[in-house]
Amino acid sequence: MHEVDGRWSVAGAEKAMGEWFRVGAERERPLALVVCQNDAMARGARAALAKQAADSGRRELGRTRLVGCDGMEQEGQAMVARGELAATVVVPPTTPSALEALGRFWDSGSPAGEIL
């Protein structure tokens, strides 16, 4: 198992994966799975894998399974439906609950009694 810092972005993940292929000590080993902290980084990792597959002739890299996280309908879930991700972790949005708590605070002047 190896960890690279994708900087939470498509470009960051693509760059980190590309750098790992360039200098990684075990870059010739088969990759069974790439797990990303968000679906955007999974997209960047997919791009780096496709580029490395083309550049190195290792076509299996283009078929490496990826897992993302966030699972938003228009991004991660859509990527799963298109076969670009093996899976995504669906993380429920917290914004609606936070806005409700803020509204209660504004209405009452006291902090929310529960932790969200």
Image: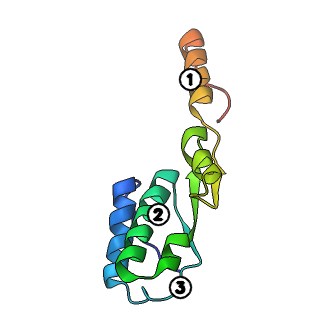
Q: Nearer the viewer, mark 1 or mark 3?
A: 3
Rendered view: 47 above or below 111: below
Mark 1 and mark 3 lie on one chain; the one further toward the N terminus is 3
Q: Residue at x 49, y 59 (%)?
A: 42
Pointer 2 residue: 46
**In terms of depth relative to the viewer, which is nearer, 21 or 47?**
47
Mark 2 and mark 1 lie on one chain; the one further toward the N terminus is 2
Q: Is residue 63 visible?
A: yes
Instruction: Give coordinates of residue 34: x percent, y percent.
Output: 54, 70
Rendered view: 71 above or below 62: above
Question: Quadrant location of the C terminus?
Answer: top right
Which labelled disc corresponds to residue 30?
Answer: 3
Q: Residue at x 54, y 80 (%)?
A: 31
Q: Is residue 111 visible?
A: no
Give the crowd class for mark 3: few <14, some 14-19, many >=20 residues within 10 Å.
few
Instruction: Give coordinates of residue 114: x percent, y percent.
Output: 68, 31
Instruction: Give coordinates of residue 61: x percent, y percent.
Output: 49, 76
**In terms of depth relative to the viewer, which is nearer, 44 or 55?**
55
* Contact flag, marks 2 and 1 (Cβ < 8 Å): no
Instruction: Give coordinates of residue 22: x percent, y percent.
Output: 31, 81
Rendered view: 63 above or below 1: above
Pointer 1 residue: 99
Report, in whole angstroms, how far the alpha carbon at label 1 lies from the one at label 3: 46 Å
Report, in whole angstroms, how far the alpha carbon at label 2 lies from the one at label 1: 35 Å
- Amino acid of disc 3: Pro
- Amino acid of disc 1: Leu
Give the crowd class for mark 2: few <14, some 14-19, many >=20 residues within 10 Å.
many
